[in-house]
Image (tube, rainbow, N blue to C red):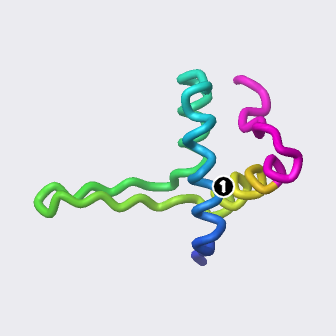
Amino acid sequence: MRTTIDEKDAHAALSLFDPVWDVLEPRERARLMHLLIERVVFDGPKGEIAITFYPLGVRMLAEEVDTAERRQGVPDLVEARS
């Protein structure tokens, strides 16, 4: 069963990357990508990449953005460093 997210959630989640990405440690960046990306498929002959996101991961990130906007702060994306 495939769950989809709406464009608003995807836009909100992806808009978070610009202000936060540069302050994340490489390990935190990797963790974030693992939480969001389910699969990447590269079609060499066509030169195309298809990225499948985990819908719940994107939705949770969108909720973080919404919460941050309400409190006018920067969201804490990384719970505990592992």
The secondary structure making up most of the magenta span is loop
Q: Is residue 31 left or right of residue 52?
A: right
The amino acid type found where label 1 is placed reads: Gly
Label 1 crowd bin: few (<14), some (14–19), many (20+), radius 10 Å: some
Q: Residue furthest right?
A: 71
Q: Which residue is farthest left? A: 45
Judge left or right: residue 29 versus residue 57: left
Q: Return the residue found at the far front.
A: 72
Residue range (magenta): 67-82
Q: Is residue 73 magenta?
A: yes
Question: Where on the picture, by quarter, is residue 34?
Answer: top right
Residue at the image position 79 percent from the left and 51 percent from the top: 69
**Side of 52 where 3 appears, left or right:** right
- Asked where in the image residue 17 lies, by quadrant, the reply is top right
Rendered residue at 73%/55% (across/down): 60
Q: Nearer the viewer, residue 70 or 5?
A: 70
Q: In which quarter of the image is the C terminus?
A: top right
**Quadrant in the picture for the N terminus:** bottom right
Where residue 5 appears, as percent x and y from the top left, is: 62, 72
> Is 45 covered by the magenta stretch?
no
Q: Position of residue 24 (x, y in %)?
A: 61, 26
What is the count of numbered marks?
1
**Would you name the residue on which mark 1 appears?**
57
Q: Which residue is drawn at 58% across and 72% down?
A: 7
Q: What element carries label 1?
A: helix
- Image coordinates of residue 15 in percent, x first then y, are 59, 52
